[in-house]
Image (spheres, rainbow, N blue to C red):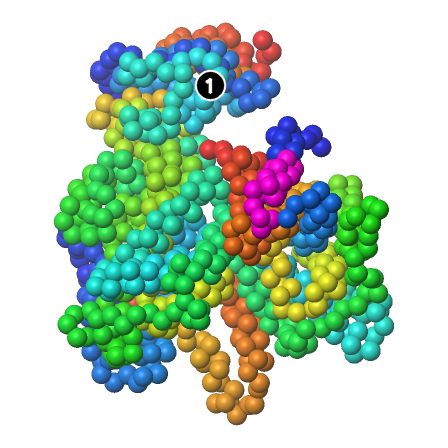
């Protein structure tokens, strides 16, 4: 297996004692872990363990009742969706959340919206600043399209694309924001072996070429063990283990959880 | 059904508001005449007319609950039912037979709508279905008047429309309105039982939730829709009879439906009790505002007051009083 | 084969982003402009100019406005008439309060006032969605019409209740409103304004704000998560849409009917414009024009058809049948092509790509 020499830096995101409930249902129970700059961090666990909810807390869609999130040195009780997007957190979704009425190109361009500064009057006039900006960002988006090898579908309405391509377009939209942290929610769900290899390659390339920190939820153990630097294991909202892939793989509590042994 | 705390607050707050504001207006302005018996008279009159709105709103709720379609043509259905009834009666049929025949016509209408419109638009987004019902509304409006003519027709039920004195002769209440309220109450209870406790009712609720899932457990979508639209047609017929007796069967009936919309917003689109309570609030609020507030502003606020009231409620509860809370998941 | 995209290579992003990317499209547009600006005023009869082209252009403008709000941004609105009325009455007050103001300023001023009102009534859209919002827009419709009817200030306390738009010139001696204005002048003036605003609309929808609107329409939660600000995006849609509708209303009152009356902008008008964008195609600039043409021409056709066929039908019967045919057409379009005439048009273009070859 190729070993990339990844430059893993300091902690950029720390979650401390995060607890999240919906009414009487406790979704996350005292979860604490951190994420280092440049690493690929996986969150794994059986279905319903709270993994997606964890991502939702990180990017501000859910607000935890307890605990704190420290991002870029700032400690907060909860994240705000808009602030998260503006400060470099982007994500993909378990059930694809693309804009079905728009083309691939337009979808990825929406990922650039925070970087586009022209006001509505400049856009109404178009020629001049707005056109320049549009072309500038189009260039960036085309680089992403090349990277993800989706050139031939750039004008297709995404509603017509096969599932695997939709996932790629969604990844493209997240990349368009040039994020510091990329949250990937089951990027390989429903894919065959070839598609998984492609997606794994993309993830590694993103981490390697752009230095993006990646937090990944994934069920395919092979992928998780191969790609990740560190792994967090959740089950029924509780944290079972936190460490390198090997450590986690040989952890008895984790094995029990997956085999369904009550603990 | 667990009643939430803020619903009680809202209703109480409304009642207080509707009492305090007219009283204050009466004290402040010469143009507003206020005394307690008069207040109650207007309030009760408003409540009763609110019941009439509820009758129409019920038709909306039924269809929305069971097929997820916001049926803009409910008003046109009311008009069409009333026109057909009066028309058939005018052709010589005795009233009871005319009513039965009209019920049959509403059934045929439901079948036609299902076959020609609904089945062709099965998986489309709600907004497309909504716009299709606008088309149906226009069509029915034109069709009914082409068939039966557009002059105002009289519908006489034999119930006195003269106001009777109640409460020691202090308050005037319309006998007819009381009758309408009674009918509406019966319908509501009946429909409520239908939805909660019968097999068909359960199937209707399943269809409202998810067409495809309902299909996959073997619920015959077509039949369900025909049933629902027929029932809505029957509710429309009752509403048409009530309103038609009150104001004559004419094109304006179709526009009454627009008044039912604030009722729906307030009560929630999917709730039968919501349609009732929403109707009461809108009816009372509208009348009270017209009598006690309007003279200060310029008059004629009945056009929009109901909407503003509903809008204000929405600010606190976007799903209406009893509507289902819209939970967004990612 | 005659009409094709093959062989047209765009080598810059700028070219790819242009409004008309195929030479045939560009030539057609030049042709259409020539016909509109030169041919029609030269040969068009009074009837054509005054009773068909003017309302068509003005309603197309209103349809553009509504399409931006409903077709692109997904906020269903039944309040178009109210915003048109706002434009009409604002224009009237501006023209009568500042008699020396140029008519272009009056009209755009009216548009700005309508935009402000639109923003106000758009605020609920943050909390309310879908049908609830549609019903809320009805509130604005009824309220605004009541406002203009009830308070005499808007009509300058006219005793008769009929207010005429004052005569105004555009440059020098050329009258565009009032009795001295020629139809040709009115037509060209309206045409110019509509063309400019259609261009603005096209620019907006192909820019960032257009994508933001469509994102809000398609999946607003996802839009919010990627950083699109919900409230300002929706309010911009309301503002732009109301601006367009306000200008349309001012044009309607000043250039088309010559009088300012609230009932011209009642809830039926709102539905009429909604039908235009449904039939024309939601989310399409061209669709607004196609839909407006359809809705303007259909009643004329229906009115003349019986006489053409030799049938004798009473006028009120004709109007009932109009309702029926209208309703049936709406349903028909929604079944056959929910994306309206605009989609039918692009399907036709796809067929034209191959014609005369079968495949």
Q: Tell me where residue B77 sits by quadrant.
A: bottom right
Is B260 situated left or right of C306 in this image? right
Is A41 situated left or right of C3 in this image? right
Task: Give the image location of residue C309, x and y in percent.
Answer: 51, 90
Locate the N terminus of chain B by quadrant. Answer: top right
Q: Is residue A217 visible?
A: no
Q: Which residues are magenta?
A: B15-32
Q: Tell me where residue B160 sits by quadrant.
A: bottom right
Task: Give the image location of residue C95, x and y in percent.
Answer: 28, 63
Q: Residue at x 47, y 61 (%)?
A: C149
When the figure is inspected, residue B71 is found, relative to residue A206, above or below; the finding is below
Q: Is residue A125 magenta?
A: no
In the image as oriented, which residue stretches furthest toward the bottom?
C310
Look at mark 1 in the image and give the residue it sits on.
Answer: A64
When the figure is inspected, residue C297 is found, relative to residue C208, above or below; the finding is below
Q: Nearer the viewer, residue B92 or B279?
A: B279
Mark 1: few/some/many CA within 10 Å (<14, 14-19, 20+): many
Q: Residue at x 37, y 16 (%)?
A: A76
Q: Which secondary structure class fits the magenta region best?
A: helix
């Amino acid at each position: 297996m190729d070993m990339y020499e990844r430059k893993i830096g300091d902690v950029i995101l720390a979650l401390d004692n995060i607890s999240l409930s919906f009414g009487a249902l406790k979704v996350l129970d005292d979860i604490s872990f951190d994420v280092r700059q440049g690493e690929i961090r996986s969150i794994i666990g059986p279905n319903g363990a709270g993994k997606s909810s964890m991502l939702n807390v990180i990017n501000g869609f859910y607000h935890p009742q307890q605990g704190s999130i420290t991002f870029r040195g700032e400690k907060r009780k909860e994240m705000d969706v808009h602030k998260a997007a503006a400060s470099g957190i982007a994500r993909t979704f378990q059930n694809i959340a693309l804009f079905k009425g728009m083309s691939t190109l337009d979808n990825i361009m929406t990922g650039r919206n925070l970087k586009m500064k022209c006001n509505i009057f400049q856009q109404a006039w178009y020629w001049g600043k707005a056109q320049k900006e549009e072309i500038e960002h189009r260039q960036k988006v085309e680089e992403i399209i090349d990277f993800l090898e989706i050139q031939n579908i750039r004008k297709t309405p995404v509603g017509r694309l096969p599932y695997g391509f939709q996932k790629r377009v969604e990844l493209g939209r997240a990349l368009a924001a040039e994020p510091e942290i990329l949250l990937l929610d089951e990027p390989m769900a429903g894919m065959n072996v070839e598609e998984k290899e492609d997606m794994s390659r993309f993830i590694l390339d993103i981490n390697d070429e752009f230095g993006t920190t990646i937090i990944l939820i994934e069920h395919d153990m092979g992928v998780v063990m191969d790609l990740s630097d560190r792994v967090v294991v959740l089950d029924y909202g509780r944290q079972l283990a936190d460490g390198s892939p090997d450590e986690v793989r040989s952890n008895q509590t984790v094995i029990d959880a997956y085999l369904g042994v009550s603990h | 059904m667990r009643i939430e705390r803020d619903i009680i607050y809202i209703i109480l707050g409304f009642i207080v508001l509707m009492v305090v504001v007219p009283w204050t207006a009466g004290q402040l302005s010469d143009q507003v005449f206020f005394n307690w018996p008069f207040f109650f008279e207007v309030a009760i009159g408003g409540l009763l007319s609110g019941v009439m709105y509820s009758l129409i709103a019920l038709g909306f709720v039924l269809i929305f609950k069971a097929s997820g379609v916001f049926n803009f043509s409910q008003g046109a259905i009311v008009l069409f039912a009333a026109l057909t009834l009066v028309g058939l009666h005018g052709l010589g049929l005795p009233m009871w037979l005319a009513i039965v025949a009209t019920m049959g016509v509403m059934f045929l209408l439901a079948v036609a709508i299902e076959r020609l419109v609904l089945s062709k638009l099965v998986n489309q987004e709600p907004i497309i279905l909504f716009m299709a019902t606008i088309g149906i509304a226009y069509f029915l409006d034109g069709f009914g008047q082409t068939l039966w003519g557009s002059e105002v027709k009289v519908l006489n039920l034999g119930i006195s429309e003269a106001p009777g004195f109640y409460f020691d002769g202090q308050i005037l209440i319309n006998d007819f309105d009381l009758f309408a309220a009674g009918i509406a109450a019966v319908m509501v209870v009946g429909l409520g039982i239908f939805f909660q406790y019968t097999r068909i009712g359960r199937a209707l609720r399943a269809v409202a939730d998810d067409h495809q899932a309902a299909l996959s457990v073997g619920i015959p979508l077509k039949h369900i829709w025909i049933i629902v639209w027929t029932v809505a047609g029957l509710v429309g017929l009752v509403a048409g009879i009530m309103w038609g007796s009150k104001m004559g069967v004419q094109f304006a009936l179709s526009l009454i439906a627009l008044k039912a919309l604030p009722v729906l917003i307030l009560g929630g689109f999917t709730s039968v009790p919501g349609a009732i309570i929403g109707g009461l609030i809108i009816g009372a609020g509208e009348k009270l505002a017209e009598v006690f507030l309007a003279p200060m502003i310029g008059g004629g606020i009945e056009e929009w007051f109901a909407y503003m009231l509903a809008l204000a409620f929405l600010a606190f509860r976007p799903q209406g009083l009893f509507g289902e809370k819209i939970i967004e998941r990612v | 084969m005659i009409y094709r995209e093959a062989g047209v290579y765009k080598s810059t992003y700028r070219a790819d982003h242009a409004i008309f990317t195929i030479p045939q499209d560009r030539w057609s547009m030049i042709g259409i402009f020539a016909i509109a600006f030169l041919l029609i005023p030269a040969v068009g009869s009074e009837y054509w100019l005054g009773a068909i082209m003017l309302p068509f252009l003005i309603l197309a403008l209103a349809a553009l406005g509504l399409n931006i709000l409903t077709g692109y941004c997904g906020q269903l609105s039944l309040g178009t008439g109210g915003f048109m009325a706002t434009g009409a009455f604002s224009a009237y007050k501006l023209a009568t309060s500042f008699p020396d103001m140029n008519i272009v300023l009056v009209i755009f001023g009216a548009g700005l006032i309508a935009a402000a009102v639109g923003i106000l009534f758009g605020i609920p859209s943050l909390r309310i969605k879908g049908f609830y919002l549609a019903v809320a827009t009805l509130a604005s419709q009824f309220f605004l019409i009541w406002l203009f009817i009830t308070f005499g200030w808007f009509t300058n306390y006219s005793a008769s209740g009929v207010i005429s738009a004052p005569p105004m010139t555009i440059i020098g001696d050329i009258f565009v409103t009032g009795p001295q204005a020629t139809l040709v002048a009115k037509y060209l003036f309206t045409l110019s304004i509509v063309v400019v605003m259609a261009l603005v609309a096209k620019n907006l929808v192909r820019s960032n704000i257009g994508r933001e609107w469509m994102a809000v329409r398609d999946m607003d939660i996802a839009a919010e998560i990627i950083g699109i600000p919900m409230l300002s995006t929706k309010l911009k849609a309301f503002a732009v849409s109301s601006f367009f509708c306000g200008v349309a209303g001012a044009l309607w009152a000043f250039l088309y009917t010559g009088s300012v009356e609230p009932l011209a902008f009642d809830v039926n008008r709102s539905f009429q414009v909604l039908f235009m964008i449904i039939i024309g195609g939601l989310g399409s600039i061209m669709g607004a024009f196609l839909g407006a043409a359809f809705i303007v021409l259909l009643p004329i056709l229906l009115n003349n058809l019986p006489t053409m066929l030799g049938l004798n039908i009473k006028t009120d019967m004709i109007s009932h049948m109009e309702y029926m045919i209208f309703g049936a057409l709406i349903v028909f379009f929604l079944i056959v092509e929910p994306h309206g005439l605009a989609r039918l048009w692009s399907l036709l273009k796809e067929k034209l790509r191959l014609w005369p070859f079968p495949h």
